[in-house]
Amino acid sequence: MIGGRSPMDGVDAAWLRMDRPTNPMIINGVFVLQTPCPLARLRTLFSRHFLAHARFRSVPVQETIGGSWLEDPYFDIEAHVGRTPLPRGAGQAELEALVGQLSNATLDPRRPLWRVDLVPHYGRGSAVIIRIHHCYADGIAMVGVIMGLTTAARDGTPTDPEPWPHPLAPDGGLTSWLLPAAHWLGQALPAGASLLETGLKWLGHPLEALGGARDAAAIATEMGRLLLLPDEPDSPLRGELGLTKRVAWAPPLPLAEVRTIAHALDCTINDVVLSVVAGALGRYLGELGRDTAGLALRAALPVNLRHDDAPPLGNRFGLALLDLPVGVAQPFERLHAVQQGMRTLKHSQQPAAVLATLAALGHLPATAQDLAVEALSKKATLVVSNVPGPREPLYLGGCRVSDMHFWVPQSGSVGLGVSILSYAGEVHFGLIADARLVPEPHRIVDAFGAEFERLLLLTLLGVATLS
């Protein structure tokens, strides 16, 4: 039934095997369109431009060690791009509920692991929900691919991506970094260094330098620091996970106002939005009666490590852990704490160390990977992805995109994810959470705007006082 086998890169294989019933490794996205989009037009769009990437016509298959891509000779676009209606007049609450329901739905393992659902009646237009397994590409790559389906003009035509010379070939390995690192990975995994040696035999290509940490000693040091961090304690935002997700998003914030704060306080836009996230989480915990004084929650931040000449798909990112000062009530103090934490991370080799580890784990038996993922996931309470999007409005299938969100999956025991995406002069905040932990996600989402307004007001008052 399936033909055309190609080996899978170790990092991609690691993400393929990371699925859990409580945390499927699916990247979820939603586009809100101002006008209705016919299903036939959407199928044509994905057939012509999305499928130009051969990987999306292939089924990922787990193997004893590693994985493979198997081309599906009976690929059917109708099995991947379909219609999921809501009642006429449905609003944001109904769409959020649908996105949450689909985010934990299983994709058919007999087919390529991606699905697009058109919601034909949403407001005066429609909505498009996109789900893609993380093994195909990381969030940065997927946003680029999805944006490649859009145009800057209503009647524009997307540009076909140039075919990658070896679209299903492995991206290379981290051999030069990992061989000297057997001792520390062996200590981290009870399976021992012998499993690492076995896995390294499957790394058939030398690893490209990923920028930053280039010697094994730095990698070992960073992984040692990560593994020695205390686990995050159970809290209203961390605990036993269930099988249901909740999704919500906030009204967008003006990017110009975010930039004004960053300029006035001599910090970055990232610093501002992360401090807003910390403030919203602190406010939510306070409403639940939790004493947050001095409390910090670790956030895992995806960091792009992709080179300009890297393949357009695949996973090329690492993770950095940032302490979010949710227990700091004063907005300026909270922003300063975030700024200091981000400055420290800029000199950290954590992202490269995590990517190096995943490259090895993808070529080891699944039991070894499960132990490592579980250990690392205990070090964070949430995942926060922050992606700069296009500055100008976009059109998907001739329909203007008014709102968009992307959520990367949470791995292991992490049950909360925040999406930050700038688009067309606005900053869009979205939340995905395990329903057991956060049954009412809008209680957090609504706090994003409130915390931002508070920070903006204090900034403007401070500037006015100084002038």
Image (spheres, grey):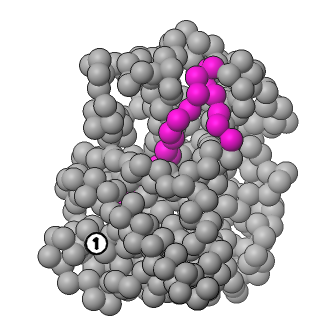
Residue 180 located left or right of residue 378: right
Does residue 226 appear in this view?
no
Q: Quadrant of residue 306?
A: bottom right
Q: What residue appears at the point 38 percent right and 24 percent down from the top-left corner?
A: 122
Q: Is residue 446 in view?
A: yes
Measured along the vertical axis of the image, is residue 137 above or below residue 168?
below
Residue flagged by tag 1: what amino acid is it? Arg
Q: Is residue 433 in the magenta section?
A: no
At x 67%, y 71%, the residue is 352
* Nearer to the camera, 414 or 72: 414
> Residue 324 in the image: x percent, y percent?
43, 78
Position of residue 364 in the picture relative to residue 201 (left or right): left
Quadrant holding the C terminus: bottom right
Residue 414 part of the magenta segment: yes
x, y percent for residue 44: 63, 13
For label 1, count other residues whose C-alpha is less than 10 Å away and answer few (under 14), some (14-19) or many (20+). many
Question: What's the residue at 45%, 21% (across, down)?
Answer: 125
Q: Which stretch appears magenta?
A: 392-417
Of 90 and 179, nearer the camera is 90
- Give the residue at mark 1: 283
Q: Check disc 1 and report its element: helix, strand or loop.
A: helix
